[in-house]
Amino acid sequence: MNTPAFPPLRTECPPGACNCGRDALLQQPEADLRIMLLTREEEKRLLQRLENIASLADLRHMLRRMQQQLGLEVQVNTSGREVRTLRGITILVVERPGLCRKTRQAIPAAIKRSLELRPEIAFELLDEASLFAPPGLQDGRR
């Protein structure tokens, strides 16, 4: 008799080290367990991939794939005011059950490292809101 092979699930964090709600998530019969597929090894691969993004299109692609495969929502936004450094770019990982606290911190850090290595991606991100457009053309009329 063949039993279906289940993909490995993320191991639990040490007691008191995290508040991810892993156990509660696993107890829910209808829960979305995709985030549990992000094992520590897969997390390392994901972070390395995020650190090595090559363009804004590549970043957007990675964010879409993370949403599709893991149910993980990451928002990358620029400040409405003047942005002088990468601190003006906010990267938010939406909290959800099963998502480790350290992972929620590591993903934005990896993306910021990538933006520091390739400032042209940050410039592209800023230009999405027409930051670099000449005055009078910032409402989308070019």
Image (cartoon, rainbow, N blue to C red):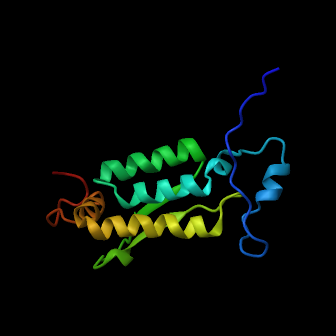
Q: Where is residue 85 in the image (x, y as percent from the top left)?
A: 30, 78
Q: Which of 26 and 137 is in front in this view?
A: 26
Q: Which residue is drawn at 43% across and 61% down?
A: 76
Q: Looking at the picture, does residue 47 appear above or below residue 87?
A: above
Q: Looking at the picture, does residue 65 appear above or below residue 17?
A: above
Q: Position of residue 109 (x, y in %)?
A: 45, 70
Q: How many discs mark residues in the rendered view?
A: 0
Q: Looking at the picture, does residue 93 appear above or below residue 142?
A: below
Q: Which of 44 and 110 is in front in this view?
A: 44
The quarter of the image holding the N terminus is: top right
Q: Nearer the viewer, residue 122 or 9?
A: 9
Q: Residue furthest front?
A: 1
Q: Which residue is drawn at 32% across and 66% down?
A: 115
Q: Position of residue 93 (x, y in %)?
A: 55, 62
Q: Position of residue 25 (x, y in %)?
A: 79, 53
The answer to whether residue 123 is left or right of residue 70 is: left
Residue 53, image quadrant? bottom left
Q: Residue furthest top?
A: 1
The answer to whether residue 100 is left or right of residue 112 is: right
Q: Residue at x 68, y 54 (%)?
A: 10
Residue 43, image quadrant? bottom right
Residue 50, image quadrant? bottom left
